[in-house]
Image (cartoon, coloured by chain):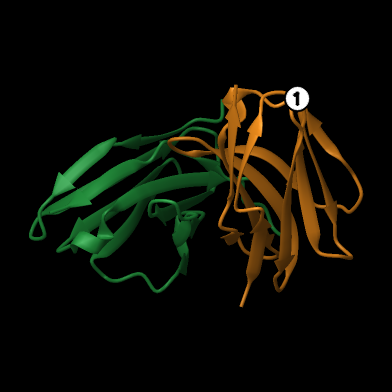
Chain colours: A green, B orange
């Protein structure tokens, strides 16, 4: 099973709202990722969690707040977003053993629209 | 700064044609190169290449890596309309989990 699930599939929110995106995997992966993808562009890395600890933050604005409550779950908390934050938000996971090279498996994404 | 350059960016072929997609890279601490296929939603994993000269195959798709010349190719033979997608090349850095993506090769297969 190589499934990563994400909820919701679509989200429309106003600039003053607070919402959360959720991601789940049951493959025993210990690395989880958030990517942002704009139309006709490749995914851009936002955050990486390794063994439930934040290991990479690609200078993402603080209105995006990641959380990894356990090894299977990854959340992205959204607050005071801007219309330019509208995009497809992809979650991914992979194995994470020292110096290993492992493919990342992507979830279906959440299509976010900020109005 | 990492560079992952894919070519051609876009191409249209007829069913049955063979497609060759190119990915060249300049990255620090190269570990592996990955190919993904993206249709309407999430990228789906195709291949991961770590060693030079070893071809990986899956059905009509194959890929190979040249670490001396810093490029990879993805071949699709006997193309079908279901092969229409964006093919993303990404490089994995050694020692961390960072993937650097190219802009993608958009392939359209017409009947």
Percent position of residue A84, x then y: 25, 62
Image height check: is A2 above or below A67?
A: above
Q: Is residue A55 left or right of residue B1?
A: left
Image height check: is B30 above or below A111?
A: below
The part of the image, by quadrant, that contains residue B27 is bottom right
Look at 38% across and 41% down and name the residue there: A109
- Decide: few, some or many residues near mark 1? Use Cα within 10 Å; few <14, some 14-19, many ≥20: few
Q: Is residue A60 left or right of residue A8?
A: right
For the C terminus of chain B, give its image quadrant.
top right
Report which residue position mark 1 lands on.
B78
Look at 61% across and 29% down and name the residue there: B83
Look at 75% across and 24% down and name the residue there: B78
Q: Is residue B53 left or right of residue A94?
A: right
Percent position of residue A55, x then y: 49, 65
| Residue at disc 1, secondary structure | loop
Q: Spot the residue most to the right.
A: B53
Residue A100 visible in the snapshot: no
Look at 51% across and 54% down and name the residue there: A51
For the N terminus of chain B, give its image quadrant.
bottom right
The part of the image, by quadrant, that contains residue B68 is bottom right
**Residue nearest the observer in this picture, B60 or A22:** B60
Percent position of residue A63, x then y: 23, 66
**Residue nearest the observer in this picture, B65 or A56:** B65
Protein chain holding label 1 = B
Q: Spot the residue most to the bottom.
A: B1
């Amino acid at each position: 099973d190589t499934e990563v699930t994400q909820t919701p599939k679509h989200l429309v929110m106003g600039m003053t709202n607070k919402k959360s995106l959720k991601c789940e995997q049951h493959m025993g992966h210990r690395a989880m990722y958030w990517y942002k993808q704009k139309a006709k562009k490749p995914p851009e890395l936002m955050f990486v969690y390794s063994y439930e600890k934040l290991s990479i933050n690609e200078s993402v604005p603080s209105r995006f707040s990641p959380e990894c409550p356990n090894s299977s779950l990854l959340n992205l908390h959204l607050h005071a977003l801007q219309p330019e934050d509208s995009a497809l938000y992809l979650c991914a996971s992979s194995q994470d053993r020292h110096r290993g090279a492992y493919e990342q498996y992507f979830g279906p994404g959440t299509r976010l629209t900020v109005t | 700064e990492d560079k992952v350059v894919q070519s051609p960016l876009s191409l249209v072929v007829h069913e049955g044609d063979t497609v060759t997609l190119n990915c060249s890279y300049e990255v620090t601490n190269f570990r592996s190169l990955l190919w993904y296929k993206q249709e309407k939603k999430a990228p789906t994993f195709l291949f991961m290449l770590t060693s030079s000269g070893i071809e990986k195959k899956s059905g009509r798709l194959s890929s190979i890596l040249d670490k001396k010349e810093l490029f990879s190719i993805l071949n699709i033979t006997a193309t079908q309309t279901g092969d229409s997608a964006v093919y993303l090349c990404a490089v994995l850095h050694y020692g961390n989990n960072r993937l650097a993506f190219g802009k993608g090769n958009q392939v359209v297969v017409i009947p």
